[in-house]
Image (tube, grey):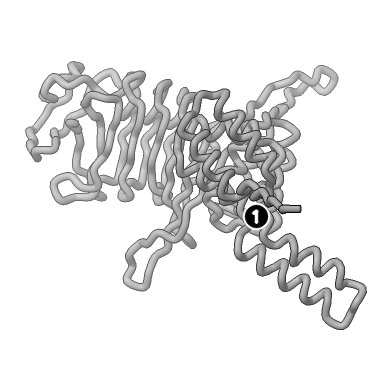
Amino acid sequence: MHILYEETEGGIRVHRCFGKGGRAVIPEQIRGKNVTELGDYVFSDGLRCLPAGRWWNDEEMADTYAGTDRDSQNAGQLPPLCGLAVRTVSLPKTIRRIGRYAFYNCYDLQHLALSSGVRDVGAGAFTGCRNLTQLTIEVTGGERSCFKEVLAELSQELVAQYLHMERGSDGQLYPAGEARLLFPAYYEEAVENTPARILETHVHGCGHRYRYAFDGTAFLFREYDRLFPWLLAQNTAQSAALLAIGRLRYPLFLEDEARSAYADYLAGHLEETAACLFKENDMDAWKWLVSELFVEKPKEKNRKVERAAANCLGNEVFAERAHEEYFDIWKPVLGKTGLGKLIELSNQAGQTEVVSFLMDTSYQLFPPARRRFELE
């Protein structure tokens, strides 16, 4: 990949990228200086002519360059990464500003990775990015984040991989957890109120609620989880299953009440849950699902023991109830019928590897009873 850039007082501003494959990975540094800005229209095909700057590529070759309308000049005849040619963009942690209309009409842009350290998102930066459905963002705890600002620009259904970082005493950033968050779609409609002679804005879909789950720029996981009933009422069952899978599999700041609500939903909607996992095509996801719904967690077992013991102490009335809870400790959350349903769905979808795994799991969790023969 070749990059056209210029040096500024604060670092490096990128004006244009050239390459093949639809993937743009912006480096953190160019010639020893941090890359801090994306120029206006950097990935848009609306840039009519290139500004003056210098070239950079993986071989650290650079030449003085005067602006021209021929994009491929001095770029080794590589096509510009702009417009419909852009599929994936990864921005470094050093980026502080995204220029105006930076991704304007990048209709096929599907995944964007960036850090929350961006301080300024230019007007119309994501206009036309209607297929941007995957977002990866690193958020540093206690520091200002651009997460809310980016979400406000994107009204389509979006899955965000939220990487929580903490700054250590040495000033370095360290991973402190991960979450996968689904933000539902929404749209706004202008409706004329004739008697009042005004236009009213009507919002359709619960996506706008999820995009306001912030306190300032800090994302509120509790508020996000509290909105699940709105999603059930206004969105599809598959979207609800996808959100529940993401929160349970990556339970960053997930409270017990929300965990139970998500797990109950998946247990009651196995068909939608299986459809989501088929799309992921990841066996680790199926192993997680089995451990989540069919194998009771040690923490839950201990909670049952403690509750049963507390109920039994000093009160014989609870003896029978305590016995039932002790007896139920080793039972899975879902029984053999639920596992059989998943096997049936996997078989219908032609997922032979998943069928094999689930059948082995069924045999381990629910071994066939041994027959006993008695001689008379």
Local crowd size for mark 1, using a 10 Å CA cut-off: few (<14), some (14–19), many (≥20): few
Residue 170, given in percent of the width and then of the height, sits at 32, 71
Q: Which residue is drawn at 66% across and 52% down?
A: 332
Seen in the picture, residue 231 relative to 172 is either above or below; the reply is above
- Viewer-closest of 186 and 310: 310
Q: In which quarter of the image is residue 80?
A: top left
Residue 326, given in percent of the width and then of the height, sits at 74, 67
Residue 24 appearing in the image: yes
Q: Which residue is drawn at 54% across and 24% down?
A: 349
- Viewer-closest of 70 and 306: 306
Side of 231 relative to 83 (left or right): right
Q: In which quarter of the image is residue 200?
A: top right
Side of 326 relative to 100 (left or right): right
Residue 280, given in percent of the width and then of the height, sits at 48, 34
Seen in the picture, residue 135 relative to 156 is either above or below; the reply is below
Q: Quadrant of residue 14?
A: top left
- Viewer-closest of 305 and 193: 305
Which residue ends up furthest to the front in the rendered image?
A: 376
Residue 149 appearing in the image: no
Amino acid bearing label 1: Arg
Seen in the picture, residue 197 relative to 369 is either above or below; the reply is above
- Viewer-closest of 205 and 303: 303
Residue receiving disc 1:
222
Query: In terms of secondary structure, where does tag 1 sit?
Result: helix
Q: Residue at x 30, y 25 (%)?
A: 22
